[in-house]
Image (cartoon, rainbow, N blue to C red):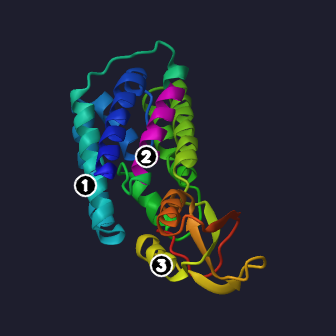
Amino acid sequence: MRNIITIIIASILMGFAYNFLLIPHKILSSGLSGIAMMLGIITPFNTGILNFLLNLPLLIIGYRKLGKRFITYTILSVVVISVSLLVIPIRAISNEPILASLFGGVIIGIGVGLIFRASGSSGGFDIIAMLLTKKRDLPLGTIISMMNGIVVLASGFIFSWDAALLTLVSIYASGKTIDLIHTNNIKLTLMIITSKGDDMKDKLLTKLHRGITIINGEGAYTGENRQVLITVITRYQLSEVKHIVQEVDQHAFVNITETKEVIGMFSRG
């Protein structure tokens, strides 16, 4: 339920950014949303309807490759964004295009990042980016930004090159904000020293689905037996791990270090 609420709020936030900051100045967003915005400006069709129709093919592909839960959340996001674009009036709240571009990009980046953290996406190029990051440790926002050259060029040819540059600012700000929020590409190595090794192992395996190495140890001062659990997790799994450790053994010692690279079997999903 928390994920669903997060996705709905983030998607509505993106709808406001589109209709209040970007569209009034003919500034486009990234991906298929940007293409839908462009078509909505130059045709009589509503941007929300176009956004939904353009996303349908990728939703079908994502259903086959990324799983039902991810696509269910993505469909929810696409529907809420599309409805928001349809319902929220287009009204400029800033007379400065550069400010509208910058803050619009940041707000959209916040929305997309929160949706990713809730195990969904806002559709469009996000689905392609998620497929790529499952194979390699690449910053998600950077990938999305790299795939948007066509949107920038289209903006320049159809509107003006000033609009294209402002679109580029919006996309860049959005990508950087996504990278700050969606930290799945950052890996952490955990070393957990506990007297309840079996309970800790079972809980971690159930909740995290990560491999764990266990080493038997002994306290140098107390002489008591301890288990040392070593595992690698993604950055935003850390809060869940902390909760598990507190639940199983409040006296456990945990050492957390950032990992530069992982070689071998590691699920990037």
Task: Identify residue type, mark 2.
Answer: Leu
Q: Nearer the viewer, residue 191 or 55?
A: 191
Q: Position of residue 209 (x, y in %)?
A: 45, 75
Q: Is residue 14 magenta?
A: no
- Residue, far top: 95
Relative image position of residue 26 (x, y in whole percent): 41, 25
For mark 3, what is the residue? 199
Q: Is residue 240 left or right of residue 55?
A: right
Q: Residues within 10 Å of mark 1 (few under 14, many from 20)?
A: some
What mark, if any, has residue 36 been given in the picture?
none
Q: Which residues are magenta?
A: 101-116
How far apart marks 1 and 2 lie (CA) works out to 22 Å
The answer to if 106 sits in the magenta stretch is: yes
Q: Amino acid at mark 1?
A: Leu
Give residue 265's quadrant in the image.
Answer: bottom right
Q: Nearer the viewer, mark 1 or mark 2?
A: 2
Above or below for 138 versus 167: below
Count the numbered circles shown.
3
Instruction: Determine which residue is flagged by label 1.
Output: 56
Point out the frontmost of discs 3 and 1.
3
Find residue 156 and report its horizontal and vertical position in percent.
50, 32
Is residue 262 in view? Answer: yes
Chain-order first, disc 1 or disc 2:
1
Separation of marks 3 and 1 at Cα, in angstroms: 44 Å
Rendered location of residue 129, percent (x, y): 47, 58
Does the rendering let one see residue 57?
A: no
Residue lying at the far right in this picture: please name it.
220
Q: Earlier in the sequence, mark 2 or mark 3?
A: 2
198 in relation to 153, above or below: below
Mark 3 belongs to which amino acid?
Answer: Asp
Identify the residue position indicated by label 2 in the image: 114
